[in-house]
Image (cartoon, helix red, strand yellow):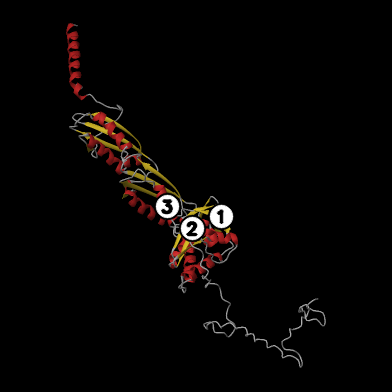
Amino acid sequence: MNIRLIALLLALSLLCGCSGGLVPNEYTVISEHSDTNVESRSDAVSAESYEELKYAILSFVEQGITHGVIRSYRYDGDVTEDLSTAAYEVWKNDPLGAYRVEYITTDCNLLLSYYESHVEITYRPDAVSAEEIGYVRGRGGAEEAIAAALEDDAERLTLRISAYGSAMDCAQLAADYCAANPETVMEAPQVTASVYPEEGSIRIVDLKFDYTHSAAERTNMQLLVSSVLTSASNYVRFRNEDNAKAQMLVAYLLGRFEYVEGSSLTPVYSLLCEGICSSRTFAEVFQILCDRVGLSCRTVSGYLDGESYSWNILQIGETYHHVDLMRYVREGLSDLVYYADSDMDRYSWDRETYPACGLPESTLENPAAPQDPPAEGEDPEAPPAEPEQPPEEQPVQPEPPAEGEDPESPAPDPEAPDGETGVQSEPEPGS
C-alpha cells in the first residue's frame, strides 16, 4: 500500500514539471482576435518598420487582396499598435485606400520568433480596379482627360490627380467643356464627382456621366447636326463679302422651321432638326456657322428684361453689329437686321467686355435676297438688263397771241367770271 502511494506521488510530480516546460511564458500568444487560425503562408510579405507596414497594406489594396499576411521578425517598435494605425492611415488618408476600401480589420499574433499580422479588407462594390484609374497632373491634365471621355461618350472616368488644387471642380470642368463644344457634345450629361480623400495634394476623383439618350442615339444626332451645318456652310461658299455671307446664313436658319421656343437636353440637335429654339442655342449655332465660313463673331451672355439671354455681335468691315436671331423669330422677321447699342434698350451686358456697336450702315443691302427665276429661254448667266428710263418731259411752248391781242396783257383767270381777268386794276385818282 505504501509503495503504491509513493508511486502515485512521483507521477504527479513528474506531470507538474512537464507542464511548465511545454508552455513557457515567452511563447504566450499576443492577439487582437484570439480566434484567428494561424497558418504558415508562402505569400506573406515582411515589414520591419511602420512605413514598411503601411506600404505592405497599401500593396494589398492595389492588388485587390482581401486577406493579406505580414510577418515581422525584427520589428522596430510596437507592431501591434502600429498595425492598427497603419491600416487606418491607408484607409482614410491614402487616395487609393480612401477610394477603394470600405473598411479594414487587423489581427496580430506572436509566434515562436516573429509576429504574424493578418489584414482583412472589404472593398467598395462600385470602385474600379487600380488598373482602370488614369493618372494626370493638375487642372490641365484633368481637362484633357475629361474632354476625351465626353467625346468618347464614356459614362465613367476615374482619375488620380497630382497637384490637386483646392479650387478644382471636375464636375464644373465637364460642364464647361460641354458648353464650349455644342457642335460635338449633343447632350450635356448630369455629372457627379466624388473626391478621395477630402484633403491632400493627390486625390482620386470618380466622375459619373448620366445621359438621357443612349450613345447610339447621341452619335446619330451628331451626324445629322454635322450634315445640316455642312449644308449651311456650302450655301454661302460662293459669296465673298462678309455681309452677303451673314445674310445668307440667317436666311438659311430662319427658313428651316416655324420655330417654337422651348428647352431641350439636346439643344443644337433640337434647333437644327426639330425647330425647338432658345436664345442661347440660336447664338451658339450662329457662332458655329460664322466660325465655319470665316466671319468674325462673338456670343454675348447678358440679359433681356432682367432674364438670362444670349445673342451675337458680328463684325462687318470696321463696324460691329448686334445680331439676335431669337428676336427675329419673335418679331416675325425673315432677313438679317443689324442693331446698334442704341437699339438695345431692353438688353444689358458687360459693355467693357464686348465692342461697341455702331449704327447700322445704310449702304448694307441684301445681296443674298433670292432672285426671280430667269424667264424661259433667258440666259441665267446674263447680267441683269438696265431698267428702262422714263421719257424726258418736253418743255411746253406757249401759244402765240391771237390776232389783235396785246401780248403783254395778263392771261385770263379760268376761275374768274366771264369778262374778268382776275387782275386788280389800279383805282382812278380821286375815286
Identify the residue at the far right of this view: 418
Marks 2 and 1, the one that precedes in the sequence = 2
Q: Secondary structure at mark 2?
A: helix
Note whether 160 is above or below 344 in the view shown: above
Q: Residues within 10 Å of mark 1 (few under 14, many from 20)?
A: few
Residue topped by disc 2: 217
Kindly identify which residue carries mark 1. Answer: 262
Query: Pointers 2 and 3 in contact (CB under 8 A)?
Result: no
Q: Is residue 280 above or below residue 390?
A: above
Task: Single out the residue that lies furthest toward the front.
Answer: 430
Query: Mark 2: few, some, or many residues within 10 Å (few <14, many ≥20)?
Result: few
Q: Amino acid at mark 3?
A: Asp
Element class at badge 3: helix
Earlier residue among tags 2 and 3: 3
Asked whether the beta carbons under mark 2 and mark 1 sit within 8 Å of each other, the answer is no
Q: Nearer the viewer, mark 2 or mark 1?
A: 1
Q: Position of residue 116 (x, y in %)?
A: 24, 32
**Percent position of residue 102, x then y:** 37, 37
Cα separation, mark 3 vs mark 1, equals: 22 Å
For label 3, the residue is 176
Q: Residues within 10 Å of mark 3 (few under 14, many from 20)?
A: some
The amino acid type, in three-letter code, at marker 1 is Gly
- In the picture, the quarter occupied by the C terminus is bottom right
| Structural distance between the alpha carbons of marks 2 and 3 | 22 Å
Q: Earlier in the sequence, mark 3 or mark 1?
A: 3
Residue 19 to residue 353: above or below:
above
Closest to the observer, 267 or 2: 267
Do we see residue 213 in this rendering? Answer: no
Q: Position of residue 333 (x, y in %)?
A: 58, 64
Q: Position of residue 104 (x, y in %)?
A: 33, 35
